[in-house]
Amino acid sequence: MTHMPDDADDLRKTTERGETGVLQHTLWYDNPSDINEQAHRAELIVRHEWDQFQLVNNEGGRANCQGNWPTFHQMRFSQFITWPLELQASYMQDLQDADDTGRNLLTEKYARMMSTTEPERYARELEPALPKLSVDRIARQEKVIATQVEWARQFRESWPKLGLAMRVLTTDEDEIDNTSFETYLRGELSTYSDTTFALYESMIGTLVERGENLTQATLLATVRLGGFVDLDEAEAAQ
């Protein structure tokens, strides 16, 4: 049994405009001419993750976020729409392979996050059941994580009001009900197959070379789903 931090309210602060709902647009369903393969695959991934999310056994009973499809869709679609097609396809295969072998990648993600929020329980109850990562894989993940934490820090400096609605940034800020961006990312990356992680790692390297910021790209998609034109407009509305 895992513990899921429920941060739907934080996302709602970022994306709502007045009393409107969280999900106003889907970026591509509203305009059929805009439908493309990248968006289609992102949608399929989110729906597959949602199915696995429904089966996560949360401590204390079903979490509120497990019944909030609009927020889940907005958060996850915003992430996957930034991915290249090959990476999307590889993660789609990870999800299918998990189904075929009786695994649940969402359960594993939240379980791994507990390595810092509840370390003793994690070591005793959860870690033995999780796939073991190699020393090399862990080192490569930590390099990616360091890059993304810095991107998140830069984003918060440029759009501080939007940044306030994000997770706390680093693992040393973790609490049982408040898991950091760093810890969440570490848990998520640890669920990827070696193939998917290698593609993800390559994407991060390409963005570094281009001087682009993945947090910025993801949050831009998030606020557009919330009905804003861009990050500056969303920042001004906070």
Image (spheres, grey):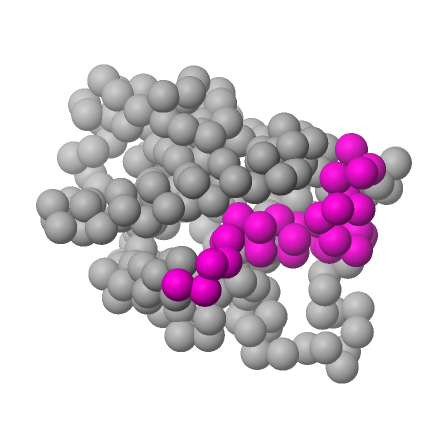
How many marks on residues?
0
Residue 150: horizontal and vertical position, in percent? 43, 40
Q: Main secondary structure of the magenta part?
A: helix
Find out whether residue 229 is within the magenta segment.
yes
Above or below: residue 101 compared with residue 131:
below
Which residue is found at the position 40% from the left and 28% from the top?
170
Horizontal side of residue 145 vs 222, given as left or right: left
Question: From this viewpoint, which residue is outermost toward the right?
Answer: 19
Q: Could you tell me if residue 200 is visible in this image? A: no
Residue 24: horizontal and vertical position, in percent? 80, 53
| Residue 117 position by quadrant | top left
Above or below: residue 54 compared with residue 25:
above
Horizontal side of residue 140 vs 158, given as left or right: left
Which residue is found at the position 53% from the left and 62% from the top?
82
Horizontal side of residue 168 vs 171, given as left or right: right
Horizontal side of residue 171 vs 43, given as left or right: left
Instruction: Indicate the quadrant containing the N terminus: top left, top right, bottom left or bottom right.
Output: top left
Residue 128: horizontal and vertical position, in percent? 16, 35
Question: 20 or 84: which is nearer to us?
Answer: 84
Segment colored magenta:
209-238
Above or below: residue 147 compared with residue 193:
above
Question: From this viewpoint, which residue is outermost toward the bottom?
Answer: 33
Instruction: Indicate the quadrant containing the C terminus: top left, top right, bottom left or bottom right.
Output: top right
Q: Could you tell me if residue 225 is visible in this image? A: yes
| Residue 27 position by quadrant | bottom right
Which residue is found at the position 52% from the left and 40% from the top?
154
Which residue is found at the position 70% from the left and 38% from the top?
14
Question: 150 or 12: which is nearer to us?
Answer: 150
Residue 112: horizontal and vertical position, in percent? 31, 36
Find out whether residue 114 is within the magenta segment.
no
Question: From this viewpoint, which residue is outermost toward the left?
Answer: 135
